[in-house]
Image: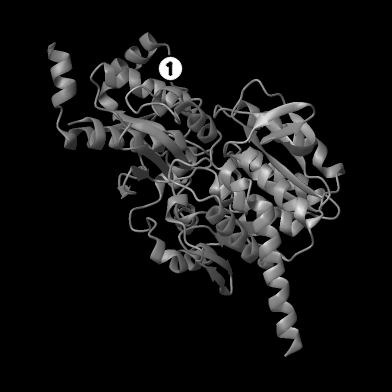
Amino acid sequence: MLVVVGTVPDEGIPLLEGQVHLENDMLVLQGRRIPVNRGTPALLAAAVAAGQILGNAPTYTYLVGDIGTGKGSRRLYEHLVRHLPKKAFEVMTFHYLQPDVDWHNRVLFALEEMKPRPVLIADAGFMYAAKMSGQAGAYDLFTPDAGEIAFLADEEAPHPFYTRGFILHEENRVPELITRAYEHNNAARCLLVKGKRDYVASREGILATIDKPLVEALEPVGGTGDTVTGIVSALVASGMSVEDAALVAAKVNRLAGLYANPTPATQVIELIKHIPRATAEILEETLKKHLSRNAR
Amino acid sequence: MSFLTFLKKKRPLKDQQADRGILVFENTSEVIRAENALKAEGWDVKVKGPPPEIRTGCDLVIEFPLIEELNVLRALEGAGVEPVKVVPVWSALLEPVSLFHTKDFGEYLMIRAANMKLTVDKKTMTIVNVSGGGCPDVPFLAQEMVGKPLSDAPSPRAIGHTLCGYALQLAYEEMQRQCLSS
C-alpha cells in the first residue's frame, strides 16, 4: 500500500488519515472534499489516477492543514513518531512538510522500527530536512527539480534559498550536480531529477534521461513536479523497481502534460486528468519493448 | 529627518559589517514581521541564513549593526515582535540567492528567484501560476495569489512564512520592477 504524508493549505483541516479517492477533480478523505491545485493534493491525485490503471490498493494518506507556520506539520510529525512503529506500509512518500531536522530525525527513527521497512520516497520540504540532517542515504528516492538538485549538491546549503552562486542551477549542469550530491552523501539511493530533461540517477551515475515530449509551457505550471512524484510513488507501490518506476513516471508525466495542451496559465488538474491515459500508453509501450527485447 | 535616522541610513556599509549581530526569532514569520518593522523605520538590516550552530531547518535571521542593539530592540519591542536572542556574528552568514532568471513565453513572463517561480499574463498583468518550492506555504501562496492582478495580489512578505515564501517575494518584487515600474 502507498502512503502519502503531507499538508494542505488550509489551517482549518485537522490531522486526517485514511484512504483517499478522487471525485470530480476533488480529493475525498474522511468525507471531506479537498481541492486539487498543487502541493500534496496534486501528488495524491496523480498517485490515485495512476494507481487506478495499475490496479493498486487504495492510496492511504496522513494529511494536515498547514499554511507555512509549521504548526500542522509538527502535529503530524508527532503523530507519525507515535504511531508508525506499529504500522506496516509498503511505500511511503513524504512531501510538503515544514523542514525541521529534529522532527525529521525522530520520524526516521520511527520508520526504522517499522517491519518491514517501507520503500521511502521524499520530495519538497521533507527532502530538504532529510538532506540537512545528513540522512539522505536512508531514502530510496528523491525527486528534486533542477533548483533542488543544486541545493542537494551544495553541502553547505540548509535550504534551496541559500544555494551558493557557483553551484546555482543551470539545466546543462545537472549531471555534475548529481555527482556532487552523491560525493557529499546528500542524495537518496536513486534520484529522479525533474526538468527540461529528466534524469534518473544513482551513485553509479546517470541511468536514463527522458526529454520527449518537450512541452515548454509546463515549466511555469505549479504542481507538475508533484504529479511526477505521485506517479512514481504509485508505480513503486505496484511492485516496480524504484529505478524503472522513475523512468516510466517521467515519461507518463510528460505525455500527460502534452495531452493537457497547456499554456503557462494552465492549472495542474488539467494534466492530472490525462494521467490514466498516459500511464496506460507508456506501460503498453514499455511492455512491447520488453517483449521485443526478450524475443531477440 | 532626525539626526539618528540620518545616521542609520548613512552609516557606511564597511562599518556595519565590522560589528554585526544577528537577531534570532521563533519562526520565519516573525523574521519577516521584524524585517518589515525595522525597514519601515529606516534601518538598513539584511535577512540572511543563520550560522551552522543555530540552524534548525527553515531559518532566517536578521543581520544588524551590533552597536545599535538597544535601538533595534526598542524598535522591535514597539512593533510587538521581539527576538528570542541576539548573537554577535563570529562566522560567515549565508547569503540568500540574489540572481533572477527571466523567461519570456510570449504572452506570459516567468521570473525565478532561487527555487520559486512566478508567472504573469503580460496583457492583463494577472498572476497565472506559482511553482517550485517545498515549504507548506507555497500551495497557500499559490492559492492566494493566482488569478489576482500583480498590483493587487497579497505579497508573499505579508502572508508567507518560510524561506520559500521569502524567495517568492523576491520573484514578486522583480516582477513588479519589470512589469509595473514604467
Quadrant in the picture for the N terminus of chain B: top left
- Above-or-below relation of B71 to A83: above
**Which picture quadrant has residue A246?**
bottom right
Q: Position of residue A237 (x, y in %)?
A: 77, 56
Residue at image coords 47%, 25%: B29
Specify the subunit that label 1 lies on: B
Per the image, the residue denoted by label 1 is B82
Quadrant in the picture for the C terminus of chain B: top left
Q: Position of residue A112 (x, y in %)?
A: 77, 51
Residue at image coords 28%, 32%: B176
The one nearer the camera, A58 or A110, is A58
Q: Position of residue A73 (x, y in %)?
A: 64, 32
Q: How busy is the neighbourhood of tag 1: few (under 14 within 10 Å), some, or many (20 plus)?
A: many
Residue at image coords 24%, 27%: B44
The one nearer the camera, A137 or A63, is A63
Color theme of the render: one colour
Residue B138 visible? The answer is yes
Residue B94 visible? The answer is no
* Label 1 element class: loop
Residue at image coords 58%, 47%: A271
**Which picture quadrant has residue A59?**
top right
Residue type (three-letter) at the residue carrying disc 1: Glu
On the rendered structure, is B83 left or right of A83? left
Residue found at the far top of this picture? B78
Q: Position of residue B88 (x, y in %)?
A: 36, 32
Residue found at the far bottom of this picture? A296
